[in-house]
Image (spheres, rainbow, N blue to C red):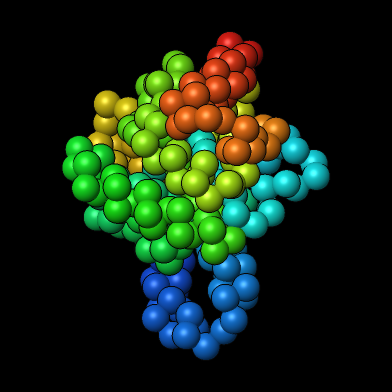
Amino acid sequence: MLKPLIIGWRLLIILIIALVSALLSLTVFYLVPLKIWHKMIRIWSNLLIKASGVKLEVSGQSNYDYLVKNHMLVANHMSWLDILILVSIHVTSFVAKAEIAKWPVINQIAKAGSTIFINRENKRDILHANQLISHELSAGKCVGLFPEGKINNGKELFLFKSPLLEAAIQAKSKIIPIILIYYRADGSFAEETLYYGRNLLQTALNTLAGKNLTAHAFILPTIDAQDFSSRHELALYLHQQMNAVYEQKIKAA
């Protein structure tokens, strides 16, 4: 009896936040400086995470290299909350699969952050996306990428797809790897947050029904895309570095 009440209450708060945010995005966006708008998006994302019953913790680089201009945030992808978490750290233009544009609430965050939606099966889409990403990075903006190209199963990181990393090399960008893991109150891995093998409604309800869940973002050392001769070499190195940390954290959970 308690779980439906918790889910209902959290859904109500999320809908209120989403409604207010949507109204603001249609009005305030055109009236305030971009810097203030970005701060509002971060606050919006943090509120939605808290409303979902999830506590956010960020650890890793203490020198805040991830705030430099012309950089790409690269993260593993396992939950519908991943985009909110990255945006709460830094407002980011995302590269995301086309279907996310249809997700309620999340699509508003994505569109507010100038998300680049692509069909990964379409080579023309990928080429066009690379041009857009390179332009964003060269303009000093931040672009977020889930290089696995799909939701992972929580056990390990899938091999990274290299095509969209080409833009980071072309734009001479800094890359900030981020590992995202969800924990229960006892420190065990929160499998209920996984989107893998479930639909959006199932994983959202599982997360909303959770108790004392924590999302932890581990920020790894900055990588210079210019140090790599090809996107394949960069993708392999990123995967090795991130998967080693991910497996260590998962085994400890």
Picture layout, residue 33 above or below residue 183: below
Picture layout, residue 197 above or below residue 14: above
- Dividing the picture into quadrants, the one containing residue 62 is top right
Rendered location of residue 216, percent (x, y): 61, 35
Rendered location of residue 201, percent (x, y): 28, 43
Residue with the most extreme top position: 251
Residue 123 as seen in the image, left or right of residue 4: left
Viewer-nearest residue: 23 or 77: 77
Q: Residue at x 64, y 57 (%)?
A: 69
Q: State the count of labels.
A: 0
Confirm whether residue 8 shows in the render. no
Picture layout, residue 199 above or below residue 183: below
Q: Residue at x 48, y 60 (%)?
A: 136
Confirm whether residue 35 shows in the render. yes
Locate the N terminus by quadrant. top left
Residue with the most extreme front position: 229
Locate the C terminus by quadrant. top right
Residue with the most extreme bottom position: 31
Q: Residue at x 57, y 84 (%)?
A: 32
Rendered location of residue 16, percent (x, y): 42, 68
Picture layout, residue 197 above or below residue 27: above
Q: Residue at x 67, y 32 (%)?
A: 220
Rendered location of residue 109, percent (x, y): 43, 60
Viewer-nearest residue: 15 or 195: 195
Viewer-nearest residue: 61 or 252: 61
Residue 116 as seen in the image, left or right of residue 70: left
Residue with the most extreme right position: 63
- Dividing the picture into quadrants, the one containing residue 177 is top right
